[in-house]
Amino acid sequence: MKLAYINPNATAHMTDGIVASACDALPEIEIFGLTNTDGPAAIQGKADGDAAVPGLLRLLPEAQRRGADAIVIACFDDTGLDEARAKAGCPVLGIGQSSYVMAQLLGLKFSVITSLAVSIPVIEENVQRHGFAPFCTSIRACGLPVLTIDEAAPDTIERIAADIETVRLEEDAGCAILGCAGMAPMKPELSARTRLHLIDGVAASGHLAKAVVSGLGAAR
């Protein structure tokens, strides 16, 4: 099985971290990444997401050419997910929706920890639209820009860990969802700092993509 992660933003370093996290979670799968060099450097809010969609869609033929059995949109806003599904010719998953599905499969209410407050309305809309609102206890912004998160400095990890601990102490949530693709490489360190279950959308989407592709094969 081949799995493509398309990063809708133009930051190749972030793509590298996403692919590395996916490979750690699914070492048995061939995984490659594609970066939308025509997109904004980071996706923070609806305007950035809208600007990223045309370039993201132009990467679909490259993913197909390289033999992708499934594609993951590696932005927690699920940027261009519906449009990509309509054009791709193979299963397309988003890391946001995959995170919510994984929490529901585990029977856990969830809180989302994202980057900036400008990202909250997009996530709220996605949660509502896909029917996950009854399971969502909160959507919290850690107040750090996406590219700052991607640097994974010690103080960044401390700040996100503090938000996770607040969720554990103050909310009826069984897990916290890491609501930015740049948080995926931090999951081991963050998990070591909390007793709350953490869901990383990069890994969740990979596991679900594997299940979907396997299911399609069995159906044939």
Image (tube, grey):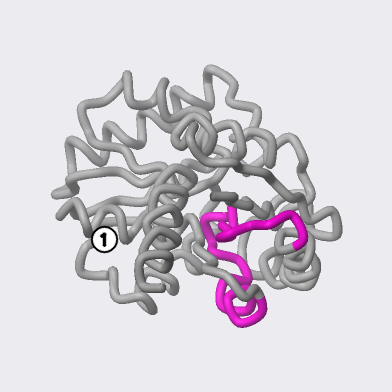
Q: Residue at 33% across / 59% down in the picture?
A: 100
- Foreground residue, 90 or 154? 90
Displayed quadrant of residue 163: top left
Q: Residue furthest front?
A: 220
- Foreground residue, 133 or 75? 75
Give the number of callouts. Answer: 1
Q: Position of residue 101 (x, y in %)?
A: 31, 60
Q: Is residue 63 left or right of residue 208?
A: right
Dot 1 alpha-carbon crowd within 10 angstroms: few under 14, some 14 to 19, many 20 or more: many
Is residue 176 rendered magenta in the image? Answer: no
Q: Residue at 76% across / 50% down in the picture?
A: 35
Is residue 80 rendered magenta in the image? Answer: yes
Displayed quadrant of residue 57: bottom right
Q: Is residue 72 left or right of residue 16?
A: left
Q: Residue at 42% across / 30% down in the picture?
A: 187
- Foreground residue, 114 or 73? 73
Tag 1 secondary structure: strand
Residue 96, above or below 91 = above
Q: Position of residue 94 (x, y in %)?
A: 51, 61
Q: Residue furthest right?
A: 38
Position of the C terminus by quadrant = bottom left
Residue 38, above or below 46 = above
- Residue extent of the magenta highlight: 65-87
Which residue, given by chain and number where applicable, does mark 1 sit on? 136
- Residue type indicated by callout 1: Cys
- Foreground residue, 193 or 102? 102
Q: Position of residue 96 (x, y in %)?
A: 45, 58
Q: Residue at 52% across / 43% down in the picture?
A: 143
